[in-house]
Image (tube, rainbow, N blue to C red):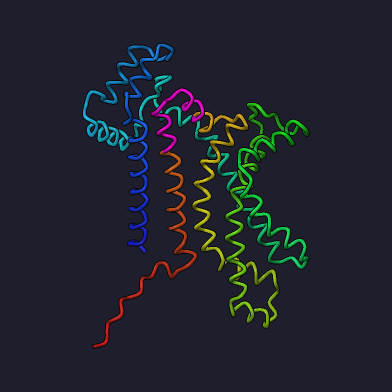
Amino acid sequence: MLRYLTRRTGQALLVLWLAYTASYALLYQIPSNPISVRLADPDNPVSPDDAARILAYYGLDRPVWEQYLGSLQRLFEGDIGFSLISGERVSTLVAKAIPSTLQLTALGLVFAILLALAIVSIVSLTRWESLRRALELLPSLFVSVPMFWLGLLVIQLFSFRLGMFVAVDDQAPSSLLFAALAMALPVSAPLAAVLMASVQAVYHEPFVEVLKTKGVGAIRIYLRHVLRNSLMPALTVLGITTGELVAGAVVTETIFSRPGLGHLTERSVANQDLPVIQAVVLIAAAAFVLANWLVDVVHPLVDPRVRTTPAPKESAT
């Protein structure tokens, strides 16, 4: 078990390093030195003294490899740079924005899981064939709907038509609920599809027929036996889905005019604030890595076979 976790942790750290290196190469090592160009812009509110300190901080007069190693050292120290627009530390800007995004992401994840479980449970337990067929089509419908279009539809219906929340800069719980719902619908689709296929496969296992012959009720069979044995593929998809929620939160926050990483990213892209953009990229990569690492940790708890490695067989001579 320890060797399994060590291997997974090493893979997660490798992915984070590759994501940081790729973002550094794409954002910083491009012609015309984008940091110097941005700071030299007369419309930039950063003062000349702050601009000089930022240029010295990034060591743009040194070779590329020294700049990269210096950025890695600062990253390990928890220093992710300064904003080229405000001169503030990027960590300060992220710390202000990330609580709202985490709140939206967590609620969206809860909605996505509950929606997927509800669809799969009704499909598995209902006796109405028409209802079953209709619900089986929902994952395909949800996954085909763009998140930004669904967000605009929610605003049009529940804000403009029904007046249930304010579409612009509304911090009320109702705005959070509708934003999370708009984000959860397309994200729940792959989770429901994989779980539904896994449940149907488990229903064809011989032990299910044995339970039926013993007179065990359908609901008990589903909850205590079928659903539990169907969770492994769904957990893998859940790890990917959680990472998608962070990226989806950026789009959803922009559409619903909510403060958070989405608003911060939109402003940074418009103003070419490269250190902030790189921090958002790193946060998104970390969300993917952390979610999948947690899934890897949970896997052995759900399926003990993952913890055991079969001993090599000796060849007969």
Q: Residue 112: horizontal and vertical position, in percent?
A: 61, 50
Whether residue 263 is situated above or below residue 44 in the rendered picture: below
Whether residue 223 is situated above or below residue 167 in the rendered picture: below
Q: Quadrant of the N terminus?
A: bottom left
Q: Quadrant of the C terminus?
A: bottom left
| Left or right: residue 51 compared with residue 212 | left
Whether residue 93 is situated above or below residue 205 in the rendered picture: above
Q: Residue at x 61, y 29 (%)?
A: 257
* Quarter residue 181 falls in: top right
The residue segment tinted magenta is 265-281
Q: Residue 283: horizontal and vertical position, in percent?
A: 43, 39
Q: Is residue 271 magenta?
A: yes
In the depicted view, which residue is nearer to us: 158 or 90? 158
In the depicted view, which residue is nearer to us: 133 or 173? 133
Q: Magenta region's main secondary structure?
A: helix
* Quarter residue 252 falls in: top right
* Quarter residue 285 falls in: top left
